[in-house]
Amino acid sequence: MQVDEDEHFLTTASEMRNKIAVLCGGRAAEELIFGEVTNGASNDIEKATQIARAMVTQYGMTDRFGMVALGQQRNRYLGGGSELTCSEGTAEDIDNEVQRIVEEGHKTALDTLRAHRFKLHEISRYLQRKETITGEEFMRIFTRDDGFAPTLPKPLSE
């Protein structure tokens, strides 16, 4: 579930990785529940790939390449994206790193859904009946301990 936070100007690498994992959630749920994938996640895959590529080429957020800009922004006002400013070999390495980051997000999404599979089904059933869910309703269902689903581990701070 993606929730907009208040005005947020800077984004950390871990926030971007979490966003990628969230974007991979729909595809991961299809795989986990149906054992098959559809084209429904295409927009999410595109967005996850764009974020990962920006992490590598624009923001210097990988150990592999460090703080080096490997791309240039084209005119933002004319709908331009970015273009690589590196050798073909480096471009291939960038593609591999982008793929690794997205796959890592996909694995995180799968692991999270597996760990909370009962809640996934409960929230899905709720959505089948109501069609929409608020953040408050989601959290109430997710954190409720009603004896049906295995209990969630308590945070260490409690």
Image (cartoon, rainbow, N blue to C red):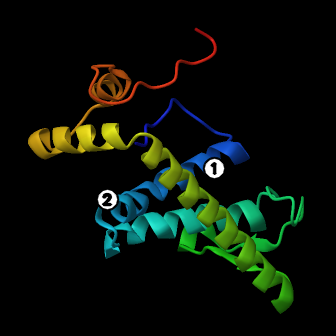
Percent coordinates x, y for residue 13 in the rendering: 72, 47
- Of all residues shown, which one is farthest toward the bottom? 88
**Front tag of 1 and 2:** 2
Q: Which mark is residue 33?
A: 2
Q: Residues within 10 Å of mark 1 (few under 14, many from 20)?
A: some
Q: How many marks?
A: 2
Disc 1 to disc 2, C-alpha distance = 26 Å
**What amino acid does circle 1 point to?**
Met
The image shows residue 122 at horizontal and vertical percentages of 24, 38
* Image location of residue 38, percent across then percent down: 31, 74
State the residue at coordinates (76%, 80%). Answer: 84
Quadrant (top left, top right, bottom left, bottom right) of the N terminus: top left
Query: Quarter-wise, where is residue 144 in the image?
Result: top left
N-terminal label among 1 and 2:
1
Query: Residue 64 vs residue 141: left or right?
Result: right
Secondary structure state at the residue bearing disc 2: helix
> Which image quadrant: the C terminus?
top right
User: Is 99 on the left-hand or right-hand side of 26?
Assistant: right
Q: Quadrant of residue 58?
A: bottom right
Residue in the foreground of this view, choosing between 153 and 128: 153
The image position of residue 49, as x and y in percent, is: 58, 68
Q: Are marks 1 and 2 in contact (CB under 8 Å)?
A: no
Residue 144, compared with residue 1, is above or below; it is above
Q: Which residue is mark 1?
A: 16
Q: Nearer the viewer, residue 75 or 86?
A: 86
Residue at the outermost left position: 129
